[in-house]
Image (spheres, coloured by chain):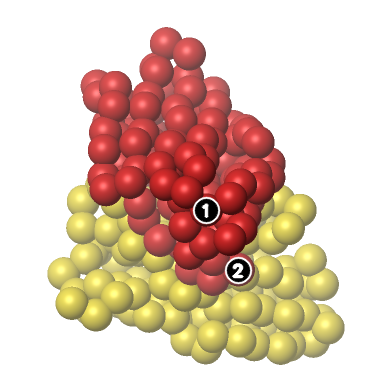
Amino acid sequence: SQQGEEDPQALSIQEGENATMNCSYKTSINNLQWYRQNSGRGLVHLILIRSNEREKHSGRLRVTLDTSKKSSSLLITASRAADTASYFCATYTGTASKLTFGTGTRLQVTL
Amino acid sequence: KAGVTQTPRYLIKTRGQQVTLSCSPISGHRSVSWYQQTPGQGLQFLFEYFSETQRNKGNFPGRFSGRQFSNSRSEMNVSTLELGDSALYLCASSSVRDGEQFFGPGTRLTVL
């Protein structure tokens, strides 16, 4: 079963614009991770944020985590056509020893 | 370091057959997890192995099984294939229990 939902389900922006994706989850977590997937290929790990962290940056990526609202957001600044992909959040709970994925956001960046 | 490798990349089988998929983790990673991805159900956890022991299992029927070898390589087996087993099967390895998981390119299984 899915841990939660991501919104929007699809997002279309132009190159240079910022893209924001949101993720909500249901249970307490150890950490939350964001992954990218290009056209049904393998998942690429983007960033991990632990439950005691509120914000994390990696290059053009900024992730926030609000454990009180059980939500996270991924911001991609200055989007490029190469950022076109599906983005998934995944939560890790220590007792379950597994990642539980959200439904994903399909991002389309046009020139 | 070489990434996670999965073989074969594509597979076509017919209903009732069985299939074995293979995964080689990143060198030094002892945890290997398997996921199934379908358009309808999304990414679903199958099982996780650590040091040849299954640590966790998802909500899949007993037709889905796996194992891990002493060199951390892992295999998963699906017996008596059904049309609904058509999916992308992804393997991931991790060096620590709650760390990043690194995914392989996946095996695309089509059941006819």
Amino acid carrying label 1: it is: Glu
Q: Which residue is mark 1?
A: A15
The chain drawn yellow is chain what? B
In this view of the protein, can residue B28 be seen by the observer?
Answer: yes
Callout 2: chain: A
Give the vertical position of A9 relative to B42 (above or below). above
**Front disc: 1 or 2:** 1
- Left/right of residue B16 with respect to residue A98 in the rendered view: right
Mark 1 or 2, nearer chain start? 1
Image-quadrant location for residue B2: bottom left
- Left/right of residue A43 with respect to residue B80 in the rendered view: left
In this view of the protein, can residue A85 be seen by the observer?
Answer: no
Residue at the top extreme?
Answer: A68
The chain drawn red is chain what? A
Q: Which residue is mark 2?
A: A39
Residue A24's x, y, as percent? 54, 27
Residue B106's x, y, as percent? 51, 74
Image-quadrant location for residue A53: top left
Residue B60's x, y, as percent? 63, 55
Q: Residues within 10 Å of mark 1 (few under 14, many from 20)?
A: some
Amino acid carrying label 2: it is: Ser
Residue for point 48% across, 64% down: A82
Residue for point 23% across, 64% down: B30
Residue for point 61% across, 58% down: A110
Secondary structure, mark 1, is: loop
Position of the N terminus of chain B, as image quadrant, is bottom left
Position of the C terminus of chain B, as image quadrant, is bottom right
Give the vertical position of B101 relative to B5 (above or below). above
